[in-house]
Amino acid sequence: MSHTRGRPYHPMTQSKIERYHGSMKNQTLLENCYLPGQLEQRLAEFVVHYNNRRYHESLDNLKPAVRLQLHALAYNRANFMRTLALPEAVKQWSLTSLREKLVKIGAKVARHGRYVYSR
C-alpha cells in the first residue's frame, strides 16, 4: 500500500477524509475546550465514537470496526479453507484468482444445466 496525496479542499479527490474532517470539526466546535489536553481528549473520544459506535451508511449501516472484523474473519476463513481443501498446485493462488476461477466454473455448470434442461 502506498501513500498518495490529493489536492486539499477538493472533495472529488479526497471525499472520505474531507467528510471525516468535517464531522470531526462539527463535533468538536460544539464544545469549548480551554486547554490543549481537553481538545486532545475530545478528539480521542470522537475517533472512538466514529470507529466503534457510529453507524455508517456507506458501510451498509455497519460500524467501521465491525466491518473490519468481518473482512478479517472472511479473509482468514478463506485462507484456512484454502489450505484444507485445495490441491498443492492451487494452494498458492490468490483469493481473487480462486474467486474468478470458481465463478467461471459456476457459469459453465449453469450453462450446461440450461442445455440439459432445454433438451
Image: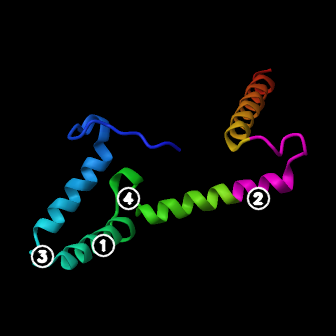
Find residue 3 and report its horizontal and vertical position in percent: 44, 43
| Mark 4, other Cα within 10 Å: few <14 / some 14–19 / many ≥20 | few
Tell me which numbered mark, 2 or 1, is placed earlier along the sequence.
Answer: 1
Q: Is residue 116 rendered to the left or right of residue 35?
A: right
Q: Quadrant of residue 32?
A: bottom left
Q: Secondary structure at mark 3?
A: loop
Name the residue located 30 percent from the left edge and 41 percent from the top edge: 14
- Tags 3 and 4 in contact by the CB under 8 Å rule? no
Tell me which numbered mark, 3 or 1, is placed earlier along the sequence.
Answer: 3
- Tags 2 and 1 in contact by the CB under 8 Å rule? no
Q: Please tell me whether residue 24 belongs to the stretch shown in magenta.
A: no
Name the image colouring.
rainbow
Q: Look at the image and give the residue range highlighted in magenta.
A: 77-93
Q: Is residue 6 rendered to the left or right of residue 73?
A: left
Q: Which residue is mark 2?
A: 80
Q: Which residue is mark 1?
A: 44
Identify which amino acid the numbered label 4 is placed on.
Asn
Name the residue located 30 percent from the left edge and 49 percent from the top edge: 17
Identify which amino acid the numbered label 3 is placed on.
Cys
| Mark 1, other Cα within 10 Å: few <14 / some 14–19 / many ≥20 | few
Q: Nearer the viewer, mark 2 or mark 3?
A: 3
Disc 2 to disc 1, how far (Cα)? 36 Å
Q: Is residue 19 above or below residue 13?
A: below
Q: Secondary structure at mark 1?
A: helix
Q: Secondary structure at mark 2?
A: helix
Tell me which numbered mark, 2 or 3, is placed earlier along the sequence.
Answer: 3
Q: Which residue is mark 4?
A: 61
Find residue 68 and report its horizontal and vertical position in percent: 51, 60
Disc 2 to disc 3, how far (Cα)? 49 Å
Q: Is residue 3 rendered to the left or right of residue 17?
A: right
